[in-house]
Amino acid sequence: MAIISNKMPSNLYGMASYDGDSIKIYLNKKRLKESLDYVIEDVMPHEYAHAVVFYKKLNRGKNGHSLEWQKVCQKLEGIRCERFVKSHDIVMGKLKF
C-alpha cells in the first residue's frame, strides 16, 4: 500500500514499513510537489526495494540497505540505489539547462 502523507518530517522523502502483516510505503507530499521526477526515479524504487526485501525476507542483517536491497533496487531500475537521498541531486534536477 502506498500512502502520500503531509505529516512526514521534511528531511524524509519516503519510508517503507513492515509490521509483520502489511507493508506500507509512505511518500512525503511536500517533497512530491517539489520534485516529482526525483521521487519517481529515486525515492520510489528505493522504497519499493525495501518492500520487496520485506516480502521476500531477504534482509539477513539489521542494515536496511544491504547488498540484497541494493540488488533489488537496481532491478527496479532505481537511478541511485544508495542509502539516503542527496539534496544536491534534487537541486540539480530542478535546474533547466
Image (cartoon, rainbow, N blue to C red):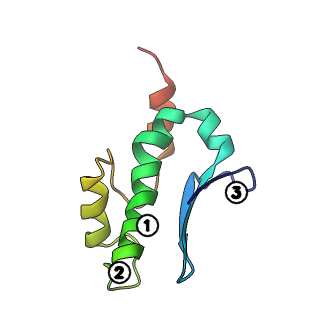
Give the secondary structure at mark 2. loop
Left or right: 17 in relation to 28: left
Give the secondary structure at mark 1. helix
> Dot 2: within a 10 Å radius of its alpha carbon, few (fewer than 14), some, or many (20 or more) residues?
few
Q: Nearer the viewer, residue 61 or 54?
A: 54
Instruction: Say which quarter of the image contains residue 31.
Output: top right
Q: Quarter holding the N terminus? A: bottom right
Residue at the limit of the structure toward the right, as seen here: 7
Q: Amino acid at mark 1?
A: Ala
Left or right: 32 in relation to 95: right
Give the secondary structure at mark 3. loop
Left or right: 82 in relation to 31: left
First in sequence: mark 1 vs mark 2: 1
Q: Nearer the viewer, mark 3 or mark 2?
A: 2
Q: Position of residue 34 (x, y in %)?
A: 61, 34
First in sequence: mark 3 vs mark 2: 3
The residue sitting at 26% across, 54% down in the picture is: 74
Residue at the limit of the structure toward the top, as seen here: 97
Q: Disc 3 designates what residue? A: 9
Q: Nearer the viewer, mark 1 or mark 3?
A: 1
Q: Amino acid at mark 3?
A: Pro
Q: Nearer the viewer, residue 23 or 45?
A: 23
Q: Disc 2 designates what residue? A: 57
